[in-house]
Amino acid sequence: AQSVTQLGSHVSVSEGALVLLRCNYSSSVPPYLFWYVQYPNQGLQLLLKYTSAATLVKGINGFEAEFKKSETSFHLTKPSAHMSDAAEYFCAVSVGNQGGKLIFGQGTELSVKP
Amino acid sequence: DAGVTQSPTHLIKTRGQHVTLRCSPISGHKSVSWYQQVLGQGPQFIFQYYEKEERGRGNFPDRFSARQFPNYSSELNVNALLLGDSALYLCASSLGGAGQLYGYTFGSGTRLTVV
């Protein structure tokens, strides 16, 4: 069965610092991996997705993630945090034989200090 | 272009009542999925519909049901509401049934409060 683990329910960084949000997945077949962001009282916005092409995936707002099969990881990074990056971030996995089902991690709340 | 629209945005119901939530996908998208997000947790998959047929169902009781209409809009119905059904209900649309290839676009959700 597929699963996603996000390490750290809360991450705090200073403005301008590196953002690193960790995600590990479990899947017996090649996975599709996603990062979503959720601002308060809003839905989910797709940041980026991995669909078995390049292992380094660039997304919106300066975020990127690297798929590492050997480590079963898909960590999200951004070189320099902005105050506007403060939000909840979700990693999700989907597999080809389960069509539209996304399995989400528990989420990581990112705080950005001035 | 309009995104995924959900209605209503907020709803308060009493235990035991029935509720219907509605979702209109992005124009041209034929797949709709429903998720339940309890406060402080990640979304949980409830249903996926593609071309008006159920393609997947999550681990939810039979009180939860859904359908998709010829115009690809969808309804989620929940009967005999429990306090634990209080959550944000999210709808996601995708161009095809294999949503992971095309990507999923989420609506802003319906906040359901059961009292």
Image (cartoon, coloured by chain):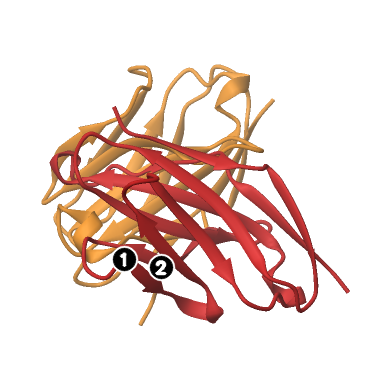
Chain colours: A red, B orange
Residue B34 higher or lower than A48, as above or below = above
Toward the right, the furthest residue is: A114
Residue B67 horizontal side relative to residue A3, left or right: left
Q: Tell me the residue at 55%/50% (across/down).
A: A22
Quarter location, residue B82: top right
Secondary structure, mark 1, is loop
User: Circles 1 and 2: CB distance less than 8 Å?
Assistant: no
Residue identified by numbered label 1: A55
Q: Residue at x 53, y 23 (%)?
A: B17
Find disc 2 in the rendering and name its residue.
A48
User: Measured from the top left, where is residue B7 in percent x and y?
Assistant: 48, 54
- How many residues crowd around disc 2 within 10 Å: few (fewer than 14), some, or many (20 or more)? many
Callout 2: SS: strand
Say if A106 sits above or below A75 in the image.
Answer: above
Image location of residue B101, percent across then percent down: 20, 61
Give the chain letter at badge 1.
A
Query: Which residue occupies the extreme front position in the image?
Result: A70
Q: Which residue: 62% across, 77% down?
A: A79
- With respect to residue A46, does B61 lie above or below? above
Look at the image and tell me whether residue B32 can be seen: yes
Instruction: Return the x and y of residue A90 as percentages of the image width and height.
Output: 52, 51
Residue B8 in sight here: no
Question: Please, is residue B33 above or below residue A62 in the view?
Answer: above
Closer mark to the observer between disc 1 and disc 2 = 1
